[in-house]
Amino acid sequence: MMARDQGIFSIDNPWPKIGWGMAVGVLVVAAVLGFGVLGRYQQNDSNLDLWNAICRGLGVTSDNGPEAETQPALHTTTRIAWTRGTLDQVAAGKREHGAFIALNCSACHGQGGVSTSTLIPTLAGMDAAVVYKQLDDYRSGKRLWGVMGAMAKALSPQDSADVAAYFADQLDGLPEIGSNRLPESGRSLREADPARRLVYAGDPQRGIPPCSACHGPGGYKIGAPALQGQQAAYIERQLASFAQGMRENDIFEQMRVIAKQLTPDEMRAVAAFYGGRAPKAESMAVR
């Protein structure tokens, strides 16, 4: 007992306390420098305050700002969803009332919806769902075009269904969509004509599906306009608008993604291919 009291373990020996004190001091200085001083500085950015520097040093975030901030409005490409209710409203369109509304459309889209301008689309024979969707996109501002925006805002959803039914029933315009809706055979990636190759086979290497899968001939997707017999210059301009992001009312951005992959020559070739296709004789029958 006496030996311990007189050795390094003596109760009165100050060195253990000094050692522990120095260790604690080093830890405190290291924490202050690491978390409070050095941790505040960021390369190519403003310095952090003490609290943010400590949190970053611990590997956690102290940013609770976004939680309290006002969230921006959800951006949607269209208000139309192809629910049973929407499809029923489109199918219930009244052609007689639609004919009266269409009198306001003939100045631009031509008599009965058959356009004579290369800059304005033909609506005669267009699927009613397509016309209904585009009118709602104009009305809601999802698709921008001054004249059409004003015209669409003057129409109710029922008016849109009525005029869509009228144009869908008109003759001498776009060919009728076939009932079987199967892609035409004999078209493949080995097709020499680039327009025919894009229309019937697409370009898998660039992630481009065939145009005919949605727009025909053969294939069809609800809400996708038929392009056979449409104004070639109009098709080309719309492809360019999608590619440049000027038009953005395509659901899931499908057309924007595809159009961005096309060269100007490919856009022109595809537009000429569809614009040069004359309506088939059998599609001219009274519907």
Image: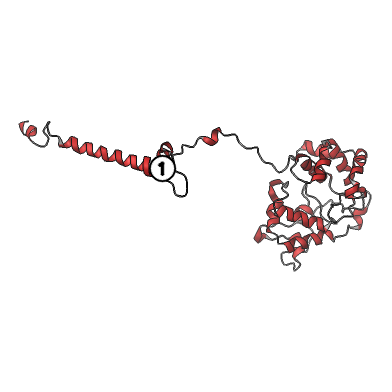
Numbered marks: total: 1
Does any portion of residue 214 appear in the rendered image? Answer: yes
Residue drawn at x 76%, y 45% as measured from the top left: 144
Going by the picture, which residue comes out furthest to the bottom? 192
Residue labelled with disc 1 = 40
Residue 93 position (above or below residue 209):
above
- Front residue (pair 165, 91): 165
Residue 218 picture location, percent across and down:
80, 55
Q: Which amino acid does the dot numbered 1 rest on?
A: Arg
Does any portion of residue 169 appear in the rendered image? Answer: no
Which quadrant, please, contains the N terminus?
A: top left
Residue 104 position (above or below residue 219):
above
In the displayed structure image, the side of residue 219 where residue 110 appears, left or right: right
- Front residue (pair 201, 75): 75
Element on which disc 1 rests: helix
Residue drawn at x 72%, y 52% as measured from the top left: 242
Determine which quarter of the picture holds residue 267: bottom right
Residue drawn at x 49%, y 37% as measured from the top left: 63
Determine which quarter of the picture holds residue 272: bottom right
In the displayed structure image, the side of residue 65 where residue 237 appears, left or right: right
Going by the picture, which residue comes out furthest to the front? 46
Residue 287 picture location, percent across and down:
92, 48
Determine which quarter of the picture holds residue 150: top right
Residue 157 picture location, percent across and down:
82, 36
- Front residue (pair 99, 200): 99
Residue 42 picture location, percent across and down:
44, 47
Q: How is the image coloured?
A: secondary structure
Q: Residues within 10 Å of mark 1 (few under 14, many from 20)?
A: many
